[in-house]
Amino acid sequence: LFRTPNGTGFTLGDQRYLRVEVHFQINRVCSDSMQQVGLHLLYSSIQDTNSKSVMKNLGIAEVAGFFPALPPRVKDATVCFRCQVEHDIEVVGFRNHGHSIATRYETFVVRNSSKLKQQVVNSPVQHRQFFQEASFSLSTSDVILLKCHYDTTKRRFSTVTGPEPKRQEMCNQYLVFYPDAVGQNWGTCSYSKTCKVK
């Protein structure tokens, strides 16, 4: 269960509506009464005047992109993305997203041109595709290295990037962080041919 830390929240700004998109994977016939998402949203239009601290705005960073086709019949096919961090942020949660052959995601933070390499996430993908708690800092000029693992041993065809879960795959990770400033990009990601930081 992921909860936003005390003193943090997502700012709606001047928006009059909040839209929530929920994806269901239905494996059997379900009645309407069984389709419950278990999502609880707390909303306040009034600033807490009793609070001595300023609310910290949360943001969600996407570490993802397109990658070349994965070859068939490989036990551990890997894809890597390299992201350059552009602002100091605190990461408080993460969510992995992959399809049927994604097995494990690893995330590393590289600081001072690979002099310090720290693994911050090592998580199975399947059945864990919801936000989980995390706690690590990212500094300007740090590099995030996301390494996605896939098992293509039962496939006779190459697997490309896409939303179709039975034939395509994704290498996506979402990081919940603060502070999030309007007009400020947290960083830039690109596909890496190797999992080594340049």
Image (cartoon, rainbow, N blue to C red):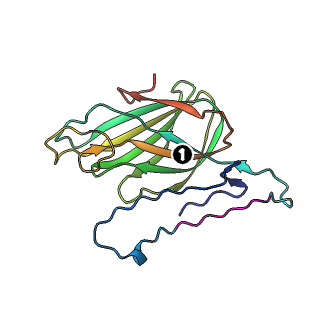
In the rendered image of this protein, does residue 165 appear above or below residue 107? below
Residue pushed farthest left?
156
Residue type at tag 1: Leu
Give the residue drawn at x 34%, y 32%. 67
Q: Write the start and end of the magenta stretch as one range.
A: 39-46
Residue 160 falls in image quadrant: top left
Label 1, on which residue?
175
Relative horizontal placement of residue 43, taking residue 162 as reference (left or right):
right
Horizontal and vertical percent position of residue 54: 80, 50
Residue 19 falls in image quadrant: bottom right
Horizontal and vertical percent position of residue 102: 31, 48
Give the residue drawn at x 63%, y 29%. 140
Residue 47 falls in image quadrant: bottom right
In-front residue for pair 27/145: 27
In-front residue for pair 101/35: 35
In the rendered image of this protein, does residue 161 appear above or below residue 164? above
In-front residue for pair 80/41: 41
